[in-house]
Amino acid sequence: MKKNSREIAIKLTNVTKRYTIHHEKPTFSEKLLKRSQKQIFTALNDIDLTIYKGEKVGIIGSNGAGKTTLLKLITGVTAPNVGTVVTQGKIVSLLDLGAGFHPDLTGVENIYLNGLIVGMSQKEIKEKFDNIVQFADIGTFIDAPMYTYSLGMKLRVGFSIGVFADPDILVLDEGISAGDQNFVEKSTQKIEEFFKLKKTIIVVSHWLDYLEARCNRIVWIKKGEIEESGSISVIKKYKKFQMIS
């Protein structure tokens, strides 16, 4: 039997992620007696998933199925309770733009700080700094503290850092909105350029037509488990499931 010679970008093995949900704030006596009401919620259960370099993978499933938890595990935002997550290459997530910004630092300072966070070297940041600033297009605010920025301005800077970091693995959703309409169009065009490159891209989306046009593989998450993983034909099965559920 011929072994798969493709390089692995992401590999999840026997991954389970649980969260503890506290239904109400325990009283002092309940804390002492350890009687506070809590529930263990399993967001993902015994997941095995291998994504190869260059794949364009769409993640589908109903709300609460575990899609966001899966992305958090892949990007290292959270860790599994059981199992292992191994990634190869630089990962950039465009799901939570500007989450790591420091409000008291200027746009310039945050570009350097976040550039380092996403895996860029200081030399690389210096070389791409002008392009990042030009693409963000927030004018003289680039020298102002981040707390003076609107949400749209923060998103523009965060998006610019992410795409110019030249990631090996890009994590996003199809509904990304970063600023005004002109910037949305510009950012959408930039993402389309990534789809044409030999990058590994993971997209979580309810917009099935978007995934069908851009992805070569679909992973269907259902109640914390992988219901099916395969070609875009998985979308047809998912649509039938939606019709009868």
Image (cartoon, rainbow, N blue to C red):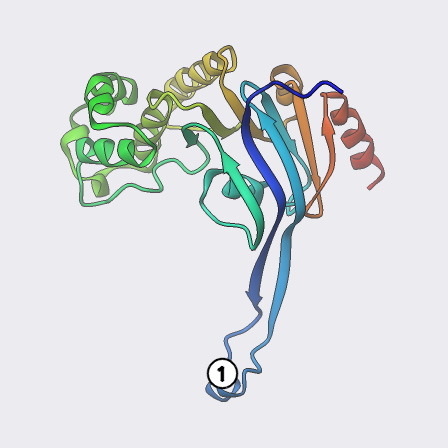
Q: Amino acid at mark 1?
A: Lys
Would you name the residue on which mark 1 appears?
31
The quarter of the rendered structure image containing the C terminus is top right
Place residue 213 in its image quadrant.
top right
Left or right: where 74 falls relative to 118: right
Work out whether 28 lies above or below 112.
below
The reply to whether residue 105 is visible in this rendering is yes
Mark 1 residue crowding within 10 angstroms, few (<14) / some (14–19) / many (20+): few
Give the residue displayed 30% in from the left and 29% down from the top: 157
The x and y percentages for residue 141 are 18, 30
SS assignment at label 1: helix
- Seen at 28% across and 41% down, the residue is 101
In this view, 29 is above or below 224: below
Q: Find residue 210 and report its horizontal and vertical position in percent.
A: 62, 20
Quadrant placement of the N terminus: top right
Closest to the observer, 128 or 152? 128
